[in-house]
Image (cartoon, rainbow, N blue to C red):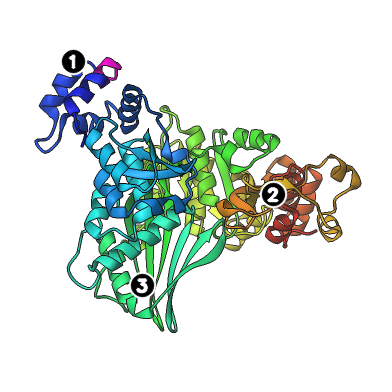
């Protein structure tokens, strides 16, 4: 991997990254196919970045973190993909008629001389980690490289050489699928849609809740693409094209660990594929990252630390309910508490939490799972969704016997959750006794931080949001002008809008009194509940989103 590994090991030891005893221990533990340096990295005694920093310091060169750099892809044209891989380099910038080139090993003088002769401009060498350079090579040159080269660059990523025989195994298809996944990850897409239409194979990414068409291919490629994706799951039947199928793909792009949930559905033009991208890096998300204002965050923090009761999160599909529940569990996950979840499907594996997968086909329903886990003596239970009376009844009984229960419902606002639970057969007095709070939420796009500038609100938007002159005088109205980073949309990333309905004694009396959802909503607002639109207005005035976004997302909340 490096020109003079023994000398490099001495440098690393002098930098106090490990001692002689650790080195001796590694020599005994390492695999026969590993070098000592590779073993040190695989055992997490040192990192790629440690190696690069020590090399840069010794060579008198600058160390750069490529993961944090914005690199213009056009600079890659100075070096071919084959040369970049062969010499373990990547161009990163043009500078004063020359070229800044990141290298893996500044002590490999033969390679540096070869690069100087290769380029038509004078290079300025900087040092970057081996893994970061490989990732940039994939970013810039994936279309030029063959399957073997891609596999060597990202050996821990998708196993691109698996299943190379048969319908889905040709190298162009492997590269095409890899590029689709890679581009979706780079654009922070939540879903990939590969759709057969009459005459074309359309590829779209869902980014910040909106679908964007990114590619179009001949329809004849569909069977090979579908077969390749099924092979990557390892569980889906390649030959079966008549029924829907589900599977999962585990992948690694750079520092990002991903799970892709794959769904295929037969259509009139062939099998349609949707892949949900589940970024494991988002597991660390906490309540502050969801988009709460400080007062709502403090209120919700108190609620999720109650000893018992039910806390419901409501909203339509794709409104971030599961992410909110995971953030709650992360916040209260302590060694002295046992937390069990029942989910369909288990989207992320949470450290220190017991997660149960619902499997309806074998009788492992939400209700059946809940009956079993109550015998496991949990303190906190999370139910993916309350769908029927049996599940709701068990959840309520659990909450009334000293358990804190989190779950979701599909309703448009918080007060409507009471009517929804009554509709599935739960008695009103049980709802009043068990439920502690109901939070409705939506996801709204944030203004892109790279192109944010001062903005204005139109008269129509002022009327729609019922803004006062006093509010406008104190407001920081912003907008995004559009840039490459946000795909010229002016928006990048999403946050939540929240409507928190706390169930106090007065509200319990109203529920027991069989009040309608509209009456409950009216009283909740009198007691201080802020609606989704009102929360959106606060975020417009704070300059984090736009008035048009709030109006779009809260169309049903205009009273």
* Closer to us: 458 or 484: 484
Residue 545 disc label: 2
**Label 1: few (<14), some (14–19) or many (≥20) C-alpha neighbours in 10 Å:** few
x, y (%) of residue 534?
76, 49
Secondary structure under tag 2 reads loop
Q: Which residues are magenta?
A: 12-17
**Label 2: few (<14), some (14–19) or many (≥20) C-alpha neighbours in 10 Å:** many
Tell me which label, 2 or 1, sits earlier in the chain: 1
Tell me which label, 2 or 3, sits earlier in the chain: 3
Q: Is residue 475 left or right of residue 205?
A: right
Secondary structure under tag 1 reads helix
Could you tell me which quadrant the N terminus lies in?
top left
Find residue 400 and report its image quarter.
top right
Task: Tell me which residue sits at (29%, 68%) in the image.
Answer: 173
Tell me which label, 1 or 3, sits earlier in the chain: 1
Q: Disc 2 or disc 3, which is closer to the eye?
A: 2
Task: Tell me which residue sits at (68%, 42%) in the image.
Answer: 502
Q: Does residue 391 sit above or below 60 in this rendering?
A: below
Q: In whole angstroms, how far apart are the C-alphas of marks 2 and 1?
A: 55 Å
Residue 244 disc label: 3
Task: Tell me which residue sits at (20%, 30%) in the image.
Answer: 37
Q: Disc 2 or disc 1, which is closer to the eye?
A: 1
Q: Is residue 236 left or right of residue 214?
A: left
**Label 3: few (<14), some (14–19) or many (≥20) C-alpha neighbours in 10 Å:** some
Residue 20 disc label: 1
Q: In whole angstroms, how far apart are the C-alphas of marks 2 and 3?
A: 39 Å
The answer to whether residue 16 is magenta is yes
The answer to whether residue 310 is magenta is no
Could you tell me which quadrant the C terminus lies in?
bottom right
């Amino acid at each position: 991997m490096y020109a003079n590994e023994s000398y490099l090991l001495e440098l690393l030891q002098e930098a106090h990254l490990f001692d002689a005893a650790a080195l001796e221990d590694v020599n005994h533990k390492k695999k026969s196919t590993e070098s000592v340096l590779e073993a040190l990295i695989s055992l997490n005694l040192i990192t790629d970045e440690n190696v690069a920093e020590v090399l840069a310091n010794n060579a008198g060169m600058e160390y750069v973190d490529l993961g944090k750099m914005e690199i213009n892809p056009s600079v890659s044209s100075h070096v071919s993909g084959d040369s970049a891989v062969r010499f373990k380099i990547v161009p990163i910038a043009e500078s004063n008629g020359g070229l800044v080139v990141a290298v893996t090993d500044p002590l490999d003088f033969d390679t540096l001389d070869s690069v100087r002769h290769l380029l038509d401009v004078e290079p300025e060498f900087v040092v970057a980690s081996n893994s970061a350079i490989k990732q940039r090579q994939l970013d810039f040159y994936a279309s030029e490289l063959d399957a073997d080269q891609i596999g060597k660059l990202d050996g821990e990523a998708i196993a691109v050489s698996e299943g190379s025989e048969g319908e889905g195994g040709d190298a162009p298809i492997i590269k095409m699928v890899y590029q689709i996944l890679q581009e979706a990850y780079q654009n922070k897409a939540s879903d990939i849609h590969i759709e057969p239409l009459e005459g074309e194979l359309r590829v779209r990414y869902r980014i910040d809740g909106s679908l964007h068409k990114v590619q179009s291919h001949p329809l004849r490629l569909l069977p090979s693409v579908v077969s390749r994706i099924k092979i990557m799951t390892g569980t889906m039947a390649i030959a079966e094209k008549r029924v829907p199928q589900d599977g999962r793909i585990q992948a690694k792009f750079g520092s990002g660990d991903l799970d892709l949930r794959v769904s295929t559905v037969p259509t009139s033009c062939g099998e349609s594929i949707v892949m949900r991208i589940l970024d494991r890096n988002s597991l660390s998300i906490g309540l502050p990252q969801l988009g709460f204002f400080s007062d709502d965050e403090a209120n919700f923090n108190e609620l999720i630390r109650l000893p018992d009761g039910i806390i419901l999160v409501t909203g339509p599909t794709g409104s971030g309910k599961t992410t909110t529940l995971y953030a709650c569990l992360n916040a209260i996950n302590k060694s002295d508490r046992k937390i069990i979840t029942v989910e369909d499907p288990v989207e992320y594996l949470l450290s220190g939490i017991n997660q149960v997968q619902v499997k309806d086909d074998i009788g492992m329903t939400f209700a059946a799972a809940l009956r079993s886990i109550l015998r496991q003596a949990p303190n906190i239970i999370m139910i993916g969704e309350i769908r029927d009376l049996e599940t709701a009844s068990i959840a309520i009984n659990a909450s009334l016997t000293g358990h804190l229960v989190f779950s979701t419902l599909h309703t448009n606002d918080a007060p409507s959750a009471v009517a929804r639970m009554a509709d599935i057969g739960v008695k009103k007095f049980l709802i009043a006794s068990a439920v502690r709070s109901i939070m409705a939420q939506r996801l709204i796009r944030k203004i892109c931080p790279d192109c944010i500038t001062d903005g204005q609100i139109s008269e129509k938007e002022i009327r729609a949001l019922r803004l006062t002159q006093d509010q406008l005088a104190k407001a920081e109205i912003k907008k995004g002008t559009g840039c490459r980073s946000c795909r010229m949309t002016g928006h990048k990333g999403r946050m939540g809008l929240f409507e928190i309905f706390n169930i106090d004694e007065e509200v319990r009396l109203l529920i027991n009194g069989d009040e309608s959802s509209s009456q409950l909503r009216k009283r909740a607002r009198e007691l201080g509940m802020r609606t989704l639109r009102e929360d959106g207005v606060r975020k417009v005035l704070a300059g984090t989103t736009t008035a048009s976004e709030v109006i779009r997302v809260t169309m049903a909340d205009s009273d």
